[in-house]
Amino acid sequence: MKEKSLGQILREARIRNRISLDDLEKETGISSHYLLAIELDQFKIVPEDKLNHYFALYGQMVGIDFQSIMKLYDLQQSLEEENPSSSVTKMVEEKLSTRRKTNPTYEVKPSIVVSDFSNQTSEKKVLTKGKSRHKRQKVDAISRWPIYVISCLAVFILCGVFFLIWHQSGLHSSQSQLSHSSSSKKVTQSSSQSQPTSIFSGTSVDETGSQLTATVTNKQDQAEIEVSLTDAESSWISISNTDIVQGGMLLSQTNPSYKTTLATDIQSVVITLGITKGVSVKVNGQELDLSALQSTDLTYITLNFQKGE
């Protein structure tokens, strides 16, 4: 079992005493960036003339005497000189390298059904009935034929007019339905094409809210990662398999972002953030949602890359 470093001992003592970094910064007057550097054993970031003073203030807050801290510091420095390859960042990678991958989920969009509207038509029948009273008892049957013929022609003409009106009305209704259906399909296609497909899937966060894991579907040969400040004034970051894996770097207003391109054979990286509020992480131009990370201390983001079609 590996012995705990000085930074780990101080951090566990702070958590055990339920003291946040913000509280520690207010009580001691030490900047949170230097407090993070001490907990990460990155003592070279802290000004050399203030390091012993910061140790004393930190130990007083968490209940560890200054002499014990200096003994651990001297021992750790001598061990690092003998074995310079060890680093806290590698310990973070070993801790999070076994995170499992989750399968991406797919959303099935409901199909749009265009309803047909049935046209109800009513036919009107006009019945004409001629009643005539004849005062004469004898009427010649031949004189009735013109009346019958004219009546039949009138009924036939009326039926033809109603049929033409019904036919034109049905044709206009069908054209309106076809036009509405075509417009609906065009709107659906344009809306589906305008929505970009997310490259992130299987995102999960542990119970403490400090570790996030996501699967990245990468259709390119290389992956580009960018970490930048949005609302925060500064933040310490570290990314494995990059040139800042050893000591990390501090993002500030003069240097607000860091961008790197991963090699093609890298399948997983770990991003360590000093703070998450006001910091954005982008992969190939798409921003990763960090709202689920609720921890105010160090947070870790594991990105597992898989080749897309």
Image (cartoon, helix red, strand yellow):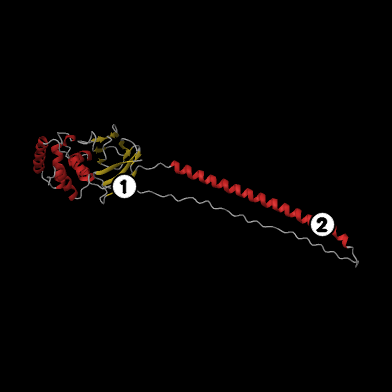
Circle 1 SS class: strand
- From the viewer's perspective, tell me whether residue 184 is left or right of residue 152: left
Asked whether the viewer can see residue 29, the reply is no
- Decide: few, some or many residues near mark 2? Use Cα within 10 Å; few <14, some 14-19, many ≥20: few
- From the viewer's perspective, tell me whether residue 287 is left or right of residue 37: right
Where in the figure is residue 266, as x and y percent of width and height? 26, 38
Q: Quadrant of residue 51?
A: top left
Q: Amino acid at mark 1?
A: Thr
Residue at 58%, 49% in the rendered image: 177
Instruction: Please tell me the numbered disc located at residue 203.
Output: 1
Q: CA distance from mark 1 to mark 2?
A: 86 Å
Asked whether the viewer can see residue 165, the reply is yes
Q: Nearer the viewer, residue 288 or 279?
A: 288
Give whichever of discs 1 and 2 has the lower sequence position. 2
Q: Amino acid at mark 2?
A: Val
Where in the figure is residue 3, as x and y percent of width and height? 12, 45
- Viewer-nearest of discs 1 and 2: 2
Circle 2 SS class: helix
Residue at 71%, 53% in the rendered image: 162
Residue behind mark 2: 149
Quarter placement of the C terminus: top left
* CB within 8 Å, label 1 to label 2: no
Q: Nearer the viewer, residue 97 or 238?
A: 97
- From the viewer's perspective, tell me whether residue 108 is left or right of residue 60: right
Where in the figure is residue 258, as x and y percent of width and height? 28, 34
Q: In this rendering, is residue 136 above or below 263?
A: below
Q: Nearer the viewer, residue 228 or 14?
A: 228
